[in-house]
Amino acid sequence: MKLTANLQLQDIHETLSKTALPADPDYTGNAATVEAYIRESILEPEAYTVEGYSPLMPKTYAASLDEEELAALVDYLLTLK
Ligand code: HEM
């Protein structure tokens, strides 16, 4: 069901957003700040996949979001601490 799927996705993102910058020594991305990490995770989800998760995040957001939408999403996710 769509509602259930959306709730699960929200759970994943809420849990992940609490992890902040990966303390993972195997972090494979290029971000040096939490903000850059969130931005990178949206634009290039496969720069780094959080341990225990599958690389399911769509790679379509770089093409579908404009800078204003991206900035709004990053700002919002930064509030979920
Ligand atoms: C506008 C929509 C979305 C935004 C802004 C977003 C944002 C993010 C961010 C910031 C992370 C990294 C979180 C962290 O490491 O703490 C992440 C990870 C993840 N996302 Fe999303 N996401 C979106 C849509 C989706 C969708 C549609 C799916 C699946 C159908 C998905 C699945 C995942 C999964 C499985 C991870 C963990 C694995 C990984 O690191 O790539 N996300 N997402």
Image (cartoon, rainbow, N blue to C red):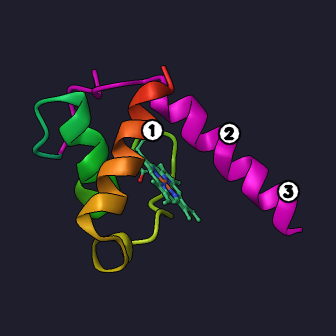
Residue to which mark 2 is pinned: 11
Q: Amino acid at mark 3?
A: Thr
Considering only order in the chain, which callout, 3 or 2, is on the residue closer to the N terminus?
3
Residue at mark 1: C-beta within 8 A of ligand 1: no
Q: Nearer the viewer, mark 1 or mark 3?
A: 1
Residue to which mark 3 is pinned: 4
Foreground of the two, 65 or 9? 65
Q: Tell me which segment is drawn in magenta.
A: 1-28
- Kindly tell me whether residue 27 is visible in this rendering: no
Q: Secondary structure at mark 3?
A: helix
Residue to which mark 1 is pinned: 76
Write down the quadrant of residue 4 in the picture.
bottom right
Mark 1–mark 3 distance (CA, rounded to whole Å)? 22 Å
Identify the residue at image location x=74%, y=49%: 8
Q: Amino acid at mark 1?
A: Tyr
Mark 2–mark 3 distance (CA, rounded to whole Å)? 11 Å
Mark 1–mark 2 distance (CA, rounded to whole Å)? 15 Å
Foreground of the two, 55 or 19? 19
Considering only order in the chain, which callout, 2 or 1, is on the residue closer to the N terminus?
2
Q: Secondary structure at mark 1?
A: helix
Residue 70 lies left or right of residue 6; in this view the side is left
Q: Nearer the viewer, mark 1 or mark 2?
A: 1
**Residue 76 percent location from the top left of the image:** 45, 38
Q: Count neighbours of disc 1 (C-alpha within 10 A) and say few if under 14, some if 14 to 19, many if 20 or more.
A: few
Considering only order in the chain, which callout, 3 or 1, is on the residue closer to the N terminus?
3
Mark 1 and 2 residues: CB-CB less than 8 Å, in contact? no
Q: Amino acid at mark 2?
A: Asp
Foreground of the two, 3 or 24? 3
Identify the residue at image location x=36%, y=25%: 20
